Image (cartoon, rainbow, N blue to C red):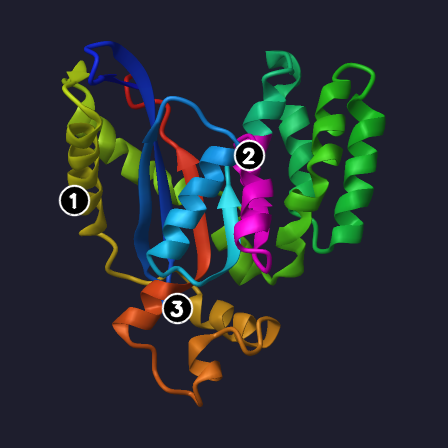
């Protein structure tokens, strides 16, 4: 959290939200940056509307933290986009219910689910997990079953794409840069000053975004088949993407909040 002074002089806690995209060349780009005191479906829809108004026409896959109301807003704004919940955050959330003594065994059994080769194998592993752990930790299997539709998205894709979409950790390196820029600033005079500083931090982080995502060509070939007609190159008689086109259409978007800014 960061603290921002409002127009009335009141200081309130705000959270920074960051959206990172992977464009058709496999390079990361900053898609959006927002500051808010609260979140929910209405807020997320306003963020997505902002992206659409600025020209982001299509998203193939979104990877999100499981923020309240966000998946629903994505389905409204980009009805063709698939939603993938961040597996790393799901595992962390599950382990909050687990004793230290059982944490390694539970994490190992959860990995059997998301590391499965197919969705059928994953569902079988989830059932095995429930039989093994529901007596002690019934909340975990219940939580995964409730969110299964947005967990199982990764099984639609080959390993090259799964590695790119199963976690939002691509933003972790950005968060470390943001913390460096904000750790000594206790209160910001207004929202604009906070956003400017965060933007400068992300610009610094982006200097290292020089290489495409690993195995990107393999992933792009799969996208071309799976999303036939939605890739600009294919929709325009194989005309190479211009800089404008690559900004307006992106295969992958990753969104998370940076609630640790104040630490």
Q: Secondary structure at mark 2?
A: loop
Residue contact between numbered discs 3 and 2, judged by CB atoms under 8 Å: no
- Residue located farthest toward the right when viewing the structure as drawn: 131
User: Is residue 188 within the magenta segment?
Assistant: no
Q: Secondary structure at mark 3?
A: loop
Can residue 152 be seen at all in this image of the molecule? yes
Q: Which residues are magenta?
A: 67-90
With respect to residue 258, does 215 lie above or below?
Answer: below
Q: Nearer the viewer, residue 242 or 170?
A: 242
Label 3: which residue?
A: 24
| Rendered location of residue 244, percent (x, y) | 28, 70
Label 2: which residue?
A: 66
| Rendered location of residue 7, percent (x, y) | 20, 18
Tell me what residue is drawn at x 64 percent, y 52 percent. 153
Can residue 168 be seen at all in this image of the molecule? no
User: Is residue 83 within the magenta segment?
Assistant: yes
Residue contact between numbered discs 1 and 2, judged by CB atoms under 8 Å: no
In this picture, residue 134 sits left or right of residue 106: right
Disc 3 crowd rating (10 Å Cα; few below 14, some 14-19, many 20+) is many
Disc 2 crowd rating (10 Å Cα; few below 14, some 14-19, many 20+) is some
| Rendered location of residue 147, percent (x, y) | 69, 37
* First of labels 3, 2 by sequence position: 3
Residue 91 lies in what quarter of the image? top right
**Which mark, residue 204?**
1
Number of marks drawn:
3
Quadrant in the picture for the C terminus: top left
Using the numbered discs, state the Cα–Cα distance from disc 1 to disc 3 in whole angstroms: 22 Å
Disc 1 crowd rating (10 Å Cα; few below 14, some 14-19, many 20+) is some
* First of labels 1, 2 by sequence position: 2
Using the numbered discs, state the Cα–Cα distance from disc 1 to disc 2 in whole angstroms: 27 Å
Residue 80 lies in what quarter of the image? bottom right
Tell me what residue is drawn at x 66 percent, y 17 percent. 102
């Amino acid at each position: 959290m960061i603290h921002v002074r409002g127009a009335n002089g009141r200081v309130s806690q705000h959270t920074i939200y960051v959206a990172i995209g992977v464009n058709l060349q496999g390079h990361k780009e900053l898609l959006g940056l927002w500051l808010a005191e609260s979140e929910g479906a209405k807020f997320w829809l306003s963020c997505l509307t902002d992206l659409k108004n600025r020209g982001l026409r299509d998203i193939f896959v979104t990877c999100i933290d499981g923020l309240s109301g966000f998946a629903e807003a994505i389905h409204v704004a980009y009805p063709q986009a698939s939603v993938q919940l961040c597996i790393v955050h799901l595992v962390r959330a599950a382990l909050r219910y687990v004793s230290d003594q059982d944490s390694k065994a539970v994490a190992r059994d959860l990995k059997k689910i998301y590391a499965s080769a197919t969705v059928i194998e994953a569902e079988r592993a989830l059932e095995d997990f429930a039989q093994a752990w529901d007596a002690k930790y019934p909340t975990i299997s219940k939580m995964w079953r409730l969110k299964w539709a947005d967990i199982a998205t990764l099984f639609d894709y080959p390993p090259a794409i799964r590695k790119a979409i199963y976690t939002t950790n691509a933003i972790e390196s950005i968060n470390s840069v943001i913390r460096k820029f904000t750790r000594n600033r206790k209160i910001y005079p207004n929202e604009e000053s906070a956003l400017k500083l965060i933007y400068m931090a992300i610009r610094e982080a982006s200097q290292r975004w020089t290489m495409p995502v690993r195995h990107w060509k393999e992933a792009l070939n799969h996208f071309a088949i799976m999303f036939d007609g939605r890739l600009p190159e294919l929709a325009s008689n194989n005309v190479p993407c211009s800089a404008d086109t690559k900004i307006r259409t992106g295969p992958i978007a990753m969104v998370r909040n940076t609630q640790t800014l104040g630490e």
